[in-house]
Image (cartoon, rainbow, N blue to C red):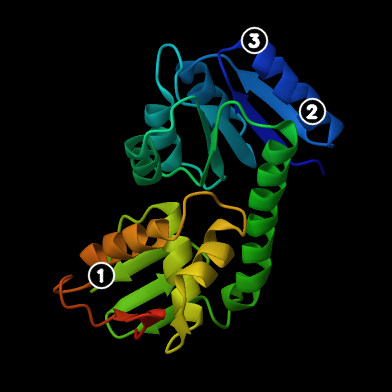
């Protein structure tokens, strides 16, 4: 079955160009010209990936991303004509998975799309054995990861994690006690060609610590190994 991609772009020529090239690659493609239409379409027929422009009429891409990220786990690649680092940080905070700055080559965009979809498939395959009825959870004291429901509980209370925070935590938990470099985490959780840089990992680790640690400034669950990366202790 063809993977479904939602293109959200108000510029007609670019929108049609993206759709044409994605269809040629075998994807099932739909498109929205403004933010409100994008949210409605994504809710009605959840896509496997979203290409999302930032500068949109009616509702900008950041708000679209924030709303959909609460409901969908599909990768979101943001398209922006701006290169400001603040935009990238805001995009990460609302749940974007990758960035492309205009103008970009169609070859690069198609490679990013393919990489994000492949990453999702690989994650599903890697974690599938753990989601069997015999092992639906990973538990570390008062911390529990429900791999079937994609939920995390601390002291019995559910934690509100962004999808990338959840994926990062699950990957760390599957490699408990091992030192994982920023580069490896970036490659395995975000994809080998993600353009955000290793700082992205540090930001998400900080967010996880704020939610998991009793004292985020002195973490005991996710510890920093100076010069090497991070280690999950449980």
Which residue is at a point 22% across and 63% down the rendered structure image?
Answer: 210
The Cα atoms of the two marked residues, 3 and 2, are separated by 14 Å
Residue drawn at x 46%, y 17% is 56
Residue denoted by label 3: 12
Circle 1 is placed at which residue position? 212
Question: In the rendered structure, which disc, 1 or 3, sits on the residue that comes first in sequence?
Answer: 3
As measured in the structure, the alpha-carbon distance from the residue carrying label 1 to the one carrying label 3 is: 45 Å
Residue 34 or 193: which is nearer the viewer?
A: 193
Numbered tag placed on residue 70 in the rendering: none
State left or right for residue 70 relative to residue 19.
Answer: left
Q: Kindly indicate the quadrant of the structure image that contains residue 26.
A: top right
* SS at mark 3 in the image: helix
What element does badge 2 sit on? helix
In the image, residue 24 lies at what x, y percent? Answer: 86, 31
Residue 203 percent across, percent down from the top left = 33, 58
Q: Secondary structure at mark 1?
A: helix
Compare marks 2 and 1 and give the one earlier in the sequence: 2
* x, y percent for residue 12: 64, 10
Q: Residue furthest bottom?
A: 177
Q: Residue at x 35, y 59 (%)?
A: 204
Q: Residue at label 2?
A: 21
Badge 3, how many Cα within 10 Å: few under 14, some, many 20+? few
């Amino acid at each position: 079955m063809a993977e479904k991609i939602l293109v959200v772009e108000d510029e007609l020529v670019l929108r049609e160009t993206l759709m044409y090239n994605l269809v040629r690659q075998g994807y099932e493609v739909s498109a929205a010209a403004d933010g409100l239409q994008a949210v409605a379409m994504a809710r009605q027929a959840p896509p496997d990936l979203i290409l999302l422009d930032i500068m949109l009429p009616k509702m900008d891409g950041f708000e679209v991303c924030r709303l959909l990220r609460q409901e969908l786990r599909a990768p979101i690649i943001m398209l922006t004509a701006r290169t400001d680092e603040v935009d990238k940080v805001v995009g990460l905070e609302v749940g974007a998975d990758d960035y492309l700055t205009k103008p970009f080559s169609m070859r690069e965009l198609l490679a990013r799309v393919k990489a994000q979809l492949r990453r999702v498939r690989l994650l599903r395959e890697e974690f599938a054995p753990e989601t069997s009825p015999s092992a639906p959870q990973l538990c570390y004291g008062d911390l529990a990861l429900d791999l079937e429901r994609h939920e995390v509980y601390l002291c019995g209370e559910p934690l509100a994690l962004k999808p990338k925070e959840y994926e990062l935590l699950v990957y760390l938990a599957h490699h408990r006690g091992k030192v994982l470099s920023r580069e490896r985490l970036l490659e395995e959780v975000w994809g080998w060609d993600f353009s955000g840089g290793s700082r992205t990992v540090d930001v998400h680790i900080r967010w996880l610590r704020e939610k998991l640690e009793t004292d985020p400034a002195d973490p005991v669950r996710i510890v920093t190994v100076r010069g090497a990366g991070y280690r999950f202790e449980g």
